[in-house]
Image: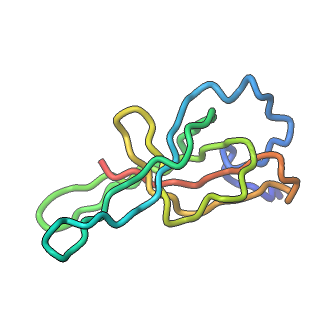
Amino acid sequence: MNAYPNQYYRTNVNTSPADLNKTIILQYKTMVPDGMGGYTTTWADAATVWAAIWPISANEQIQAMGQQMTITHRIRIRYRNTIKASWRVKFGDRYFNIVSVVDPNMAHRWLDIMVKEAA
């Protein structure tokens, strides 16, 4: 029996740096004063890194008289110990919310970031 039923989730420890052919921006939330005593939530860039991006699945949901498509991807980058699940990923004009961050085999070589995109 296959331990990884989804072929895109398999941990390929032989990923080459040449496979990281997309540029993504890692962003985190920050609070900015709005000048009237309150704060506005904005996103600040933490780092621009090279990545490989694979689509995993797409689920269609009907919500409030409309349809919403949730697309799940796996993004692989070189290991960084600063990424949190509260961050997001910007790829071109698309934004992905981080669902989880996985260090394959705990080798501190790569990070697999599982993300969701709402379209």
> Where residue 28 appears, x then y in whole percent?
46, 58
Q: State the residue in front, 55 or 99.
A: 99
Q: Nearer the viewer, residue 72 or 97?
A: 97
Q: Residue at x 58, y 55 (%)?
A: 114
Q: Using residue 111 as the reference point, say whether residue 104 is left or right of it.
A: right
* Image position of 34 with respect to 20: above or below: below
Estimate the x, y position of residue 116 in percent, counting from the top left.
45, 54
Describe the colour scheme in one phrase: rainbow
Q: Which of the 4 image quadrants contains residue 51?
A: top right
Q: Position of residue 52 (x, y in %)?
A: 63, 34
**Nearest the eye: 103 or 73:** 103
Residue at the extreme bottom: 37
Residue 34 in the figure: left or right of residue 83? left
Vertical placement of residue 77 versus 34, above or below: above
Front-lying residue, 68 or 48: 48
The residue under the point 80% across, 54% down is 104
Left-right relation of 93 to 105: left
At horizontal 63% and vertical 32% (from top left) the residue drawn is 50
Residue 58: x %, y % from top left: 43, 49
**Image side of residue 27 versus residue 21, left or right:** left
Q: Residue visible at 72% across and 58% down?
A: 81
Q: How many numbered marks appear?
A: 0
Q: Quadrant of the N terminus?
A: bottom right
